[in-house]
Image: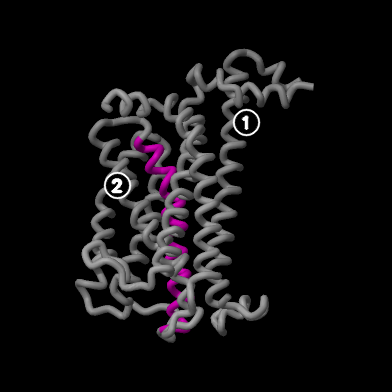
Amino acid sequence: MNKIFFHYAAPQNFYALAGRLWPWMAALASALALWGLWLGFFVAPTDFQQGQGYRIIFVHVPVSWMSMIIYLAMAFWAFLGLTFNTRLSGMMCRALAPTGAICAFLSLWTGALWGKPMWGAWWVWDARLTSELILFFLYLGYIALTNAIDDTRRADKAGGILALVGALNVPVIYFSVKWWNTLHQGASVSLTQGSKMAEIMLQAMLIMAVAFWLYAIAIALYRVRSMILMRERHAQWVADLPEIKAQFKGALP
Amino acid sequence: MIWNSAADFWAMGGYGFYVWGSFGVTALLMALEVGWVRQQRQRALAQVAAESASEQGLIKDWQS
């Protein structure tokens, strides 16, 4: 196990692994998204309270979960990077951040579009909404901070510390509906109490969640490959890659 | 079937703007992100190729 771990901690090996993995993740994500959308729009019945407007949850809940999961994944890589000083960790952290920021933005966006017809307001300063907004700013802060520092190792370290400290906000988001008496409804799906939703609605939502999860993995793997290329560009193995050699062929007459 | 017609489907029981606003912007951002990472990769490949060419003294071949 340790051997495998350290093998793939080397950028060269991870570049190859990520290249083999991302197409499968992307294909699976697309297939699950189609299935989830089919269930969500054509099989799941109308909600007796919220009419058709409730269908927003099929995108709102998955992107909200992903915004938190991606941040935790970043904190995990940041922890690995700060303790073991592996080169790959900083790159994974930075490859995940843009996707996390997009998920956090979409969580707020779809939430606003749900809130307007259901609550009568695009936005309220509710504990859950506010902590999600803070998460969005943490992503933007992370991206700005790591881009502002030219020395990549220092940028990775500074970003890693921000990712770790900011992770404290994630449980605040998750438990905000319990800790404070907020406008945002409580969890419809709970690890301890199971689900309060109709079976088919829950199924569609979970399938969409898995689809978004796989999408995030695929896109982060794809993005990290470009980062590995840039950072390792003076290494011989990079120059020997067929995709680099193909660049020359295109340039020659 | 829940929907009687295509128009019925797009109307989403009066919630059309909110439902399609949510799914539409999500799809748009995902499409933009995919385009963006692909562009990043193309740029990285081109830059790495150019640099390794100049390092190995192949810059003339590269330019011709």
For the point 32% across and 30% down, the residue is A86
Residue at 27 percent of width and 64 percent of height: A174
Amino acid type at circle 1 is: Ala
Question: Would residue A156 be seen by someone viewing this image from the given angle?
Answer: yes
Residue drawn at x 68%, y 22% is A248
Whether A224 is among the magenta residues is no
B6 to the left or right of A75: right
Query: Where is residue A222 drawn, in percent x and y?
Result: 51, 40
Q: Pointer 1 indicates a residue of which chain?
A: B
- Mark 2, Cα crowd under 10 Å, few <14 / some 14-19 / many 20+, is many
Q: Is residue A147 visible?
A: no
Residue A75 disc label: 2
Q: Which residue is mark 1?
A: B46
Instruction: Choose top left, top right, bottom left or bottom right for residue B55.
Output: top right
Q: Nearer the viewer, residue A156 or B22?
A: B22
The main secondary structure of the magenta stretch is helix
Please give the range of residues in magenta: A89-118
Q: Secondary structure at mark 2?
A: helix
Q: Nearer the viewer, mark 1 or mark 2?
A: 2
Please tell me in which quadrant of the rendered image residue B46 appears: top right
